[in-house]
């Protein structure tokens, strides 16, 4: 399946401007015969704590993406913010080419270092979805530093999707952690980051597709663009040829973790 990763330059808190630009990018991905496209975290607002500005209670962004998916016959993964009482929820949603919602994930680990936990409620469940014969797991940015949830999801997923707003100052962490999550889970890992400047931070993208053997198939640095990769059943094949995961001792790990 041809998959597109969109390294997007997000105009901070300018939702309509970003949505219009995204629609052009989606059309371009569909023209290249991609079956699904993934955008970064908080795709059309940037990483904003201003829930009163970016938060939605009417599902406007979801409806726009549903219509866009139908118009261009492509599945779309995108981030947005839902209002939840005085706080918000950091969502990542996937719709298919008919506009049906395939998955909706809420970020499990708000980034407390930046104060995200003061403005966003944490999610409490992992999310996977099937599309075109493959199984995908969804994660958002800071989740990448917590291998436990990746291990839990990889048992049933061929590809692990990490949508992010990950600043350049920690780009080395991003690159190494994406490769580590792929290697230890013998899964595809798709990292989709933004590019450009927001609130004094520079984002250099480094979006990439990493194979189940930890090899970067393609990546993009410091410019907006699309990465295309063909995902088939490489994860299942590699797990059969090198069955390291069968030696896991789940009962012992549960005991150690309490």
Image (cartoon, helix red, strand yellow):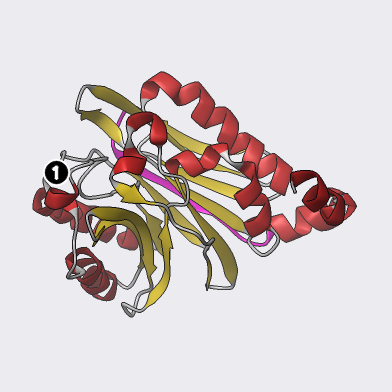
Can residue 252 be found in the magenta stretch? no
The answer to which image quadrant residue 112 occupies is top left
- Report the residue at 29% width, 70% height from top: 69
Image height of 149 relative to 142, above or below: below
Tell me if residue 122 can be seen. Answer: yes
Q: Which residues are magenta?
A: 221-233
Extreme residue in the top direction: 169
The residue to which callout 1 is attached is: 13
Q: Is residue 200 left or right of residue 253?
A: left
Residue 7 x, y percent position in the rendering? 34, 41
Q: Position of residue 132 (x, y in %)?
A: 53, 73
Res. 166 image quadrant: top left
- Comparing 156 with 58, the one in front is 58
Q: For this rendering, which residue is in front, 123 or 225?
A: 123
Q: Position of residue 231 (x, y in %)?
A: 58, 57
Q: Measuring from the top left, give residue 245's x and y in whole percent.
A: 82, 52
Answer whether residue 18 is visible to the viewer in this image: no
Q: Residues within 10 Å of mark 1 (few under 14, many from 20)?
A: some
Count of labels shown?
1
């Amino acid at each position: 399946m041809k998959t597109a990763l969109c390294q997007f330059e997000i105009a901070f808190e300018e939702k309509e401007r970003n949505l219009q630009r995204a629609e052009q990018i989606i059309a371009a991905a569909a023209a290249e015969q991609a079956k699904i496209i993934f955008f970064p975290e908080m795709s059309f607002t940037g990483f904003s704590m201003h829930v009163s500005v970016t938060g939605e209670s009417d599902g406007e962004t979801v409806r726009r993406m549903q219509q866009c998916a139908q118009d261009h016959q492509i599945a779309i993964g995108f981030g947005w913010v839902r209002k939840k009482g005085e706080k918000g929820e950091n969502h990542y949603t996937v719709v298919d080419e008919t506009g049906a919602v395939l998955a909706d994930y809420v970020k499990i680990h708000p980034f407390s270092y930046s104060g995200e936990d003061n403005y966003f409620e944490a999610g409490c469940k992992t999310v996977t979805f099937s599309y075109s014969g493959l199984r995908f797991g969804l994660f958002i940015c800071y989740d990448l530093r917590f291998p436990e949830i990746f291990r839990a999801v990889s048992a049933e997923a061929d590809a692990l999707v990490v949508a992010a707003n990950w600043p350049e100052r920690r780009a080395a962490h991003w690159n190494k952690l994406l490769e580590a999550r792929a290697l230890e889970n013998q899964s595809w890992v798709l990292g989709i980051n933004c590019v450009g400047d927001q609130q004094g931070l520079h984002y250099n993208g480094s979006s990439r597709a990493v194979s189940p053997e930890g090899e970067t198939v393609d990546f993009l640095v410091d410019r907006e663009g699309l990465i295309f990769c063909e995902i088939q059943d490489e994860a299942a094949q590699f797990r059969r040829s090198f069955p390291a995961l069968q030696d896991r001792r789940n009962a012992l790990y549960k005991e150690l973790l309490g």
